Amino acid sequence: MSASNAQEQIELHKALAPRYAFRYGFEFSRLFQQDWHAEMMRHMPAGARRVLDLGCGTGFFLAELDERRPGAVGLDISHAMLRVSEQYVPRAKVVTADAEKLPFKAAAFDTIFCKGCLHHTRDHVRFLANCQRVIDRDGVLILSEPCNDNFAIRWARTAMYHVSPHFSPEDRGFMKEELVALMERAGFEVTYAGRYGVFAYLFAGFPDHIGVLRYVPGAAWIVRQMIKLDRWICSTRFLRIVSFQVVVAGRPKRA
Ligand SMILES: C[S@@+](CC[C@H](N)C(=O)[O-])C[C@H]1O[C@@H](n2cnc3c(N)ncnc32)[C@H](O)[C@@H]1O
């Protein structure tokens, strides 16, 4: 990552840290986040013990990982984001570092999660190759990143990244096949690639941006129904293109 982008991400997330605490403060938004995490965790090997959450931000996912796999490690470039994580995982091991220069020895982890961090970086293959280095040969990397397969979503996302002060104009989402190709170039064999998140993502994922459910009685029940609907949409061949995230899992290629 260029020094200027690293600095830009640090500044950006300094301002965003309090918004994340607010975002995860509602029951309906936590419900949605937990479902998103479950979608990622279902690719974790049953025997996984050494887990890393790359770009863990304020640690909400890390707290769940640490509950299931005690000793899970979180890494983020933003110290401000990590400071918020103290309220969710006060005892967790968290590291302030750039994901493109991972301060871990080779094969240190058997599962690496990366939820929404890759698209903030500029050299994606290098980022993924770094993950490949610190992952065990039987380990797995599980990513969830913004999906740009749908034209309207791609357009709206690009516009938002350019206009909103909460994003960098150079951040961008990925086409599903593009992310698969990046993984392969970085030395991974992709074992799963699917889409995730439609209505629940939009209405429960970001109550700091789209806050309508904050005022609706029974919001948690509504989000549960949205989650079921989204799962159906993502399982259908023609509709799943309207989803907002792509989830990819892969393991290091055998030589
Ligand atoms: C969209 S947030 C996601 C945070 C968290 N995974 C979550 O789901 O709440 C992206 C995170 O990636 C971090 N980040 C951006 N560039 C990074 C880099 N080069 N190395 C490590 N973390 C980075 C940001 O500081 C931020 O916390």
Image: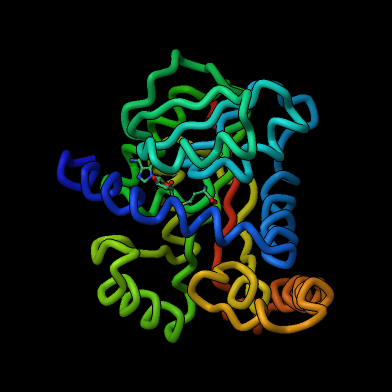
Q: Looking at the image, is 217 positioned above or below residue 28?
A: below
**Horizontal arrangement in the rendering, residue 172 relative to residue 106 (left or right):** left
Q: 242 and 159: which one is in front?
A: 159
Q: 146 and 149: which one is in front?
A: 146
**Horizontal arrangement in the rendering, residue 102 relative to residue 143 (left or right):** left
- What colour scheme was applied to this rendering of the protein? rainbow
Q: 167 and 118: which one is in front?
A: 167
Q: Position of residue 188 (x, y in %)?
A: 50, 38
Q: Position of residue 221 (x, y in %)?
A: 84, 75
Residue drawn at x 24%, y 40% is 1
Residue drawn at x 45%, y 80% is 153
Residue drawn at x 31%, y 48% is 121
Point out the residue furthest to the top here: 105
**Horizontal arrangement in the rendering, residue 104 relative to residue 70 (left or right):** left
For residue 79, which quarter of the picture? top left
What count of labels does the image hold? Answer: 0
Q: Position of residue 11 (x, y in %)?
A: 26, 49
Q: Position of residue 200 (x, y in %)?
A: 67, 74
Q: Looking at the image, is 66 positioned above or below residue 237?
A: above
